Image (cartoon, rainbow, N blue to C red):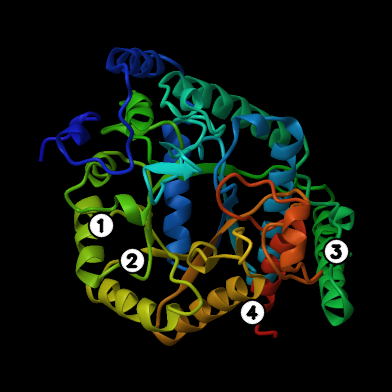
């Protein structure tokens, strides 16, 4: 079927906004189309090969970052904090899995968020919903909530600045893995703390052993690859950075290495599936409790007709209460097709709840429960869970209940910073990694 970066416009596009000035939108898309790409095709192809390796069981994938990035957080401290926790989590997972870990940040482009309602009402005032900094502004005024195409340029600029800083950090020694003693595991109590301190000690000794045997401190331990990802929701933005490159066939979305499609935009005849079927990037597909086997197989046929290794990652997000019933039929259906896909678990989105006080949160125990159930189910079904997808921050926020420090509902208001969904803080994220590592090594 004929495809172009604009063929999505012939389909029904959900979760999109109507811009008041179509000519201004066209000018912004045209300008972005002439700006340098944010990522390169060879980085994309390298990630695709790594994801294919993970699907074969040779690597494990860690994907994490903000639920929705804010322009205001395009600063060195928050970026460095997110990179630090990703690196620390990945090293814990290397220790636990004895496999390479592929690091993918929800970063440098996660500026748009789907909404369940098009409008928001406060008192007697009803305005368009806030859809992320790439679309409109959070302040509850008519002017701020008006979709502004110039914000796509601001998103491109901040994504570029973020990527530049990440690359400078990873190339300049920030990712040096020789110093796990700098980690803070003081959040852990009792036996858990002793186990975590033992993990850190073991990692440090392993690194020193490698250095002693080789006679050098290997550069591979000082530099790591960090890929970017975001939900490809705002189609004009994605279209603007989609292009052909020299010496490669086909089209690449060069706004990110790894775009994904959410459940709300995964209609088989919809605009988002139409756009994604024509790009060469590896693709993520979020699948929730409402996903049928027929729908999922239809998505696989539409998005990966050639069954390309590393092309498709299925990120299931069922919720701890639903995973036992909802996941097995989907795994069985995919296996019956003979496809090899990468399965990942997103234990965050299916476990979101609202407190009596109206604060959106997630319970740490439910997050871990869904992860552990998912690992067990894949093993029972002869499948493999090859990665985890979490919303996190390296900061000391209080947005999710539970964890070793026992954050309670009363603590949420102390440092709740997210504009959209609750995230794991530094301690909770590192604890999740250590729990996964313990599970994969057969410990409790």
Query: Which residue is the site of mark 2?
Result: 340
User: x%, y% of residue 53?
Assistant: 46, 59
Sequence-wise first label, 4 or 1: 1
Query: Which residue is the site of mark 3?
Result: 185
Q: Residues within 10 Å of mark 4 (few under 14, many from 20)?
A: some
Q: Residues within 10 Å of mark 2 (few under 14, many from 20)?
A: some
Image quadrant where one finds the C terminus? bottom right
Sequence-wise first label, 2 or 4: 2
Q: CA distance from mark 3 to mark 4?
A: 19 Å
User: x%, y% of residue 375?
Assistant: 52, 78
Query: Which residue is the site of mark 4?
Result: 439
Under circle 3, the secondary element is loop
Quick one: 341 or 28, which is closer to the camera?
28
- Kindly tell me whether residue 91 is visible in this rendering: no
Q: CA distance from mark 2 to mark 1?
A: 8 Å
Q: CA distance from mark 2 to mark 3?
A: 37 Å
Query: Which residue is the site of mark 1?
Result: 307
């Amino acid at each position: 079927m004929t495809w172009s970066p604009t063929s999505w416009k012939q389909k029904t596009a959900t979760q999109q906004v109507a811009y008041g000035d179509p000519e201004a939108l066209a000018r912004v898309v045209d300008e972005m189309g002439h700006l340098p790409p944010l990522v390169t095709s060879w980085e994309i192809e390298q990630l695709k090969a790594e994801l294919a390796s993970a699907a074969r069981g040779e690597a494990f994938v860690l994907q994490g970052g903000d639920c929705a990035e804010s322009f205001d957080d395009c600063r060195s401290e928050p970026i460095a904090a997110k990179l630090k926790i990703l690196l620390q989590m990945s090293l814990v997972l290397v220790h636990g899995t004895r496999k390479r870990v592929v690091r993918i940040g929800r970063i440098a482009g996660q500026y748009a968020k789907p909404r369940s309602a098009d409008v928001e009402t406060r008192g007697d005032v009803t305005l368009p919903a806030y859809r992320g900094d790439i679309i409109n502004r959070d302040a509850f005024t008519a002017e701020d909530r008006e979709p502004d195409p110039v914000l796509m340029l601001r998103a491109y600029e901040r994504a570029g600045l973020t990527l530049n800083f990440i690359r400078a950090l990873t190339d300049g020694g920030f990712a040096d893995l020789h110093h796990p003693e700098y980690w803070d595991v003081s959040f852990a109590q009792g036996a858990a703390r002793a186990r975590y301190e033992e993990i850190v000690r073991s990692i440090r000794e392993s690194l020193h052993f490698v250095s002693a045997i080789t006679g050098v401190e290997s550069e591979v331990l000082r530099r790591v690859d960090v890929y970017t990802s975001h939900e490809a929701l705002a189609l004009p933005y994605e279209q603007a950075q989609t292009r052909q490159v020299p010496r490669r066939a086909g089209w690449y979305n060069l706004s990110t290495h790894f775009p994904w499609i959410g459940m709300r935009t995964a209609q088989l005849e919809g605009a988002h599936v139409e756009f994604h079927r024509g790009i060469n990037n590896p693709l993520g597909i979020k699948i929730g409790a409402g996903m049928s086997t027929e729908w999922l197989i239809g998505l696989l046929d539409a998005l990966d007709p050639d069954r390309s290794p590393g092309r498709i990652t299925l990120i299931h997000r069922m919720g701890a209460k639903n995973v036992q019933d909802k996941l097995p039929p989907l795994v069985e259906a995919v296996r019956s097709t003979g496809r090899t896909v990468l399965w990942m678990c997103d234990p965050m989105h299916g476990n979101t709840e609202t407190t009596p006080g109206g604060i959106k949160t997630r319970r740490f125990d439910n997050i871990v429960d869904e992860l552990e159930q998912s690992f067990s189910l894949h093993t029972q079904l002869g499948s493999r869970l090859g990665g985890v997808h979490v919303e996190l921050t390296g900061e000391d926020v209080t947005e999710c209940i539970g964890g070793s420090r026992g954050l309670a509902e009363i603590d949420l208001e102390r440092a709740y910073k997210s504009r959209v969904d609750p995230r794991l803080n530094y301690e909770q994220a590192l604890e999740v990694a250590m729990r996964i590592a313990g599970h994969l090594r057969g410990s409790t």
